[in-house]
Amino acid sequence: DTPFVIAGRTFTSRLLVGTGKYKDFEETARAIEASGAEIVTVAVRRVNVSDPSKPMLVDYVDPKRYTYLPNTAGCYTADEAVRTLRLAREAGGWSLVKLEVLGDQKSLYPNMAETFVAAEALIRDGFEVMVYCSDDPIAARRLEDMGCVAIMPLGSLIGSGLGIVNPHTIRLIKENVRVPVLVDAGVGTASDAAVAMELGCDGVLMNTAIAQARYPVRMAGAMRLAVEAGRQAYLAGRMPRRAVADPSSPLIGLVG
Amino acid sequence: DTPFVIAGRTFTSRLLVGTGKYKDFEETARAIEASGAEIVTVAVRRVNVSDPSKPMLVDYVDPKRYTYLPNTAGCYTADEAVRTLRLAREAGGWSLVKLEVLGDQKSLYPNMAETFVAAEALIRDGFEVMVYCSDDPIAARRLEDMGCVAIMPLGSLIGSGLGIVNPHTIRLIKENVRVPVLVDAGVGTASDAAVAMELGCDGVLMNTAIAQARYPVRMAGAMRLAVEAGRQAYLAGRMPRRAVADPSSPLIGLVG
Amino acid sequence: DTPFVIAGRTFTSRLLVGTGKYKDFEETARAIEASGAEIVTVAVRRVNVSDPSKPMLVDYVDPKRYTYLPNTAGCYTADEAVRTLRLAREAGGWSLVKLEVLGDQKSLYPNMAETFVAAEALIRDGFEVMVYCSDDPIAARRLEDMGCVAIMPLGSLIGSGLGIVNPHTIRLIKENVRVPVLVDAGVGTASDAAVAMELGCDGVLMNTAIAQARYPVRMAGAMRLAVEAGRQAYLAGRMPRRAVADPSSPLIGLVG
Amino acid sequence: DTPFVIAGRTFTSRLLVGTGKYKDFEETARAIEASGAEIVTVAVRRVNVSDPSKPMLVDYVDPKRYTYLPNTAGCYTADEAVRTLRLAREAGGWSLVKLEVLGDQKSLYPNMAETFVAAEALIRDGFEVMVYCSDDPIAARRLEDMGCVAIMPLGSLIGSGLGIVNPHTIRLIKENVRVPVLVDAGVGTASDAAVAMELGCDGVLMNTAIAQARYPVRMAGAMRLAVEAGRQAYLAGRMPRRAVADPSSPLIGLVG
């Protein structure tokens, strides 16, 4: 396999995980351990970084061992997102960040117009921006052209667990950009993660699928295996599909 | 995890693999090794068991290390299938067998009527019968009632690589029988194997998906991981799916 | 279009409808009228044919205008089914019948073994048998060989509204037999009926999708249009599908 | 049914059709007639409007009978699109237009950033803009807020015939805006058109599915029926779907 490189840093694991929605930090730590992830996302607006009287993530998930990836979960404008990440940089020195600007609370679908504005400001500011986005292959290329270091389209709505609803657009994104493409929402179970990798994506980011499983630590282990399985299957080159012929409707390659 | 027991024998790996369609026995052996399988199916009618001047499978895949599972690939009547397995027992002493009686050469869909006749004769004869069958939950229960030791429904047509087309019937079969259920045709890539396990199946059997991948040994490794990933995800209890509400069409549990 | 002929009788409408699950016979009659159906199924075991003090279907749905198709809903053995249809013939003179032998109350999946026994007895008895069956193309051919006049595979479980879950097997059935093929369970909404016809089926039978819609009469009209739309689309020969190329996985015609 | 109103004009047919890709204008005219469409799109850059020595669309498809909807097919920048529609207005006086700004020739996916720029300029210019767009519910609302008179998301790539790949986002768009929503690319056959309407969309626009069918006029008639079937089914309120229960994964309404 080729190395998995984001912004010049090489990683072994292609599975990135969130740190929210767990019962407690103890469980968070055990699930992350089981997942084999090397990069963990942290919601800057939600995590306790200043009150030493309350539990702190850093006491459970060692920032020396894991690459913390601050994200802008809960931000609905470019302005909020940019301010949030500037705070994160001041607090922890992080410059590799995950940008997400959400469109509304109901769907958590990205607001792409605000995402472009924020990405531009952050890149100008010297951040290395991994960006949550819609599954729009033209927008993906534009984000790469702006200087984003990874494109992170949704597989389906955040927290939906519906998997990769539109494999066609994910494949187009992968064809359209050279920086890593990571599916960043929608994974519900192990096979979904494998599908993402089989489409040729470079990695997968998930949170709810692990944290909201009945047994999160066990699911974290399943996801570790599934991402590796999907990657190996992609590299192995799957057998052709053979369907009962529909003479009136051959399947024709559109692009490629 | 609970042990994986077929006909009183306990296995660790839930992935069973075929031995046909490879470039040569060398590749067969390496792929099986990479798959981690403990049970390998052998097409009695196709394998060379008597001519020492030609390569023999047993020289590459050690029958002391692997459980050979003779199958009736290529049989289109109960009579052919029963005779084939009697020959296998005389030649190799095998009594744990995989019965498949095919309906036609075009689809390789099972002929269930002939399958019932053959299963009955074989069980009366003292064989332990694992049985390839359609995804019919009523037929599955009848096969169990007759004494079959494992029910092996197709996920889709043999050699099609279309995956598990009808998860509803596979789930019904799993609810209807107590002996192990193994998906036995249709797997095309790693995620398909994971899906089979996530539905609660006890194992998966495949041949083409590995042998006809561009790099069979690598795919065998992917399948090993995928079966384990799917099993762990099943045991972990996945998160609920959440869809955009369609007020006119709630999804209701039908059976269970 | 070629004529739609069942057992020597020519029909115009390719939509067959059930008469159960409505609020009252008034609504039944209006929905059937809106559906344009010429054949209506009647559950012999459930319909009142003898007590003149209670409402009778025949007073609302004129047997001179509609072809009554007695069915064996609620029968779980060949014996029950055969007796039920003999009673129907004695009572109403019907010889064109719909046979269904169910496997269990939970799934309402057909019991194919009992179905074969019943079909044979009924055909020997002079009945013209339309037969509800699983989506097994080998069984379908055997039912035709026995003399059944129409093959009626399920699209998905009775009452599920999940549509045509496995189009591959329905297409195989259509290729395997010459008598009419009608999808007989699973339709949930108009597009499902269109899909059945686009696969090349000769007709569709439904009950719940109309009777359990919020506005049954309106849904009956929708189904009338959908069956005609699907039939015309089939005859028109649809455009090819064009997918983003997956070089490692071309779609290949398997059979046909 | 409520009336179908776009920019203050009421239409009866919810099916809009293109005029390109036919064998000749004769066939175009017959297919449009069979479709029942009242609005036909015209690619301003491709149609002959000035050379009287060559066949002209207006001689076959009467602009007094049909509402001509000039579109910007073939435009890849906001500037091109705006100039194209200004030309159309000068030539034919049309102010109700369909804007599409494409991202690249390979995918024909919309360029949303350029689409926003063009929509703003056109609306300022007094055009009534129906807009082809990605299936992004946040972008859809923004286009409505800018003053677009209809939102026209793709069901799948133009010319792909893959149908409505992501029903979730289409449904979200319908929830997010008040102006009419029309699915504007991807329909391949009649059932796809029915699905679009069953999701609650107000209309469907298609070209290739009709023009590239083996028998375009027949397919046009199928589409007319399918759109009406899907609309009626939506209004009728379909039965609930009932799946075999997966206790570990109930389906939960996310939004709505």
Image: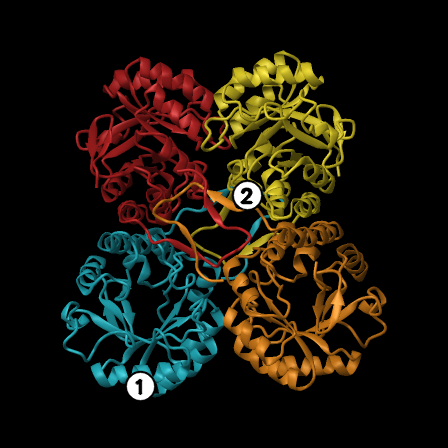
Chain colours: A red, B cyan, C orange, D yellow
Residue B181 placement, left or right of C76 = left
Quarter of the rendering containing residue A184: top left
Where is residue C244 drawn, in percent x and y?
43, 40
Residue D159 placement, left or right of D203 = left
Where is residue A103 drawn, in percent x and y?
48, 26
In this rendering, the label closer to the viewer, 1 or 2: 2
- The amino acid type found where label 1 is placed reads Gly
Residue topped by disc 1 = B126
The answer to whether residue B256 is above or below residue A133 is below
Closer to us: D145 or B115: B115
What is the crowding at mark 1: few (fewer than 14 residues within 10 Å), some, or many (at least 20)?
few
What is the crowding at mark 2: few (fewer than 14 residues within 10 Å), some, or many (at least 20)?
many
- The amino acid type found where label 2 is placed reads Gly
Q: Is residue C188 visible?
A: no
The answer to whether residue D223 is above or below residue B135 is above
Residue topped by disc 2 = D163
Closer to us: B72 or B244: B72
* Residue located at (19% from left, 69% from top): B66
Q: How many angstroms separate mark 1 from mark 2 (CA)?
A: 53 Å
Describe the element under mark 2 as helix, strand or loop: loop
Q: Dot 1 falls on which chain?
A: B
Quarter of the rendering containing residue B108: bottom left
Describe the element under mark 1 as helix, strand or loop: loop
Where is residue C153 drawn, in percent x and y?
58, 66
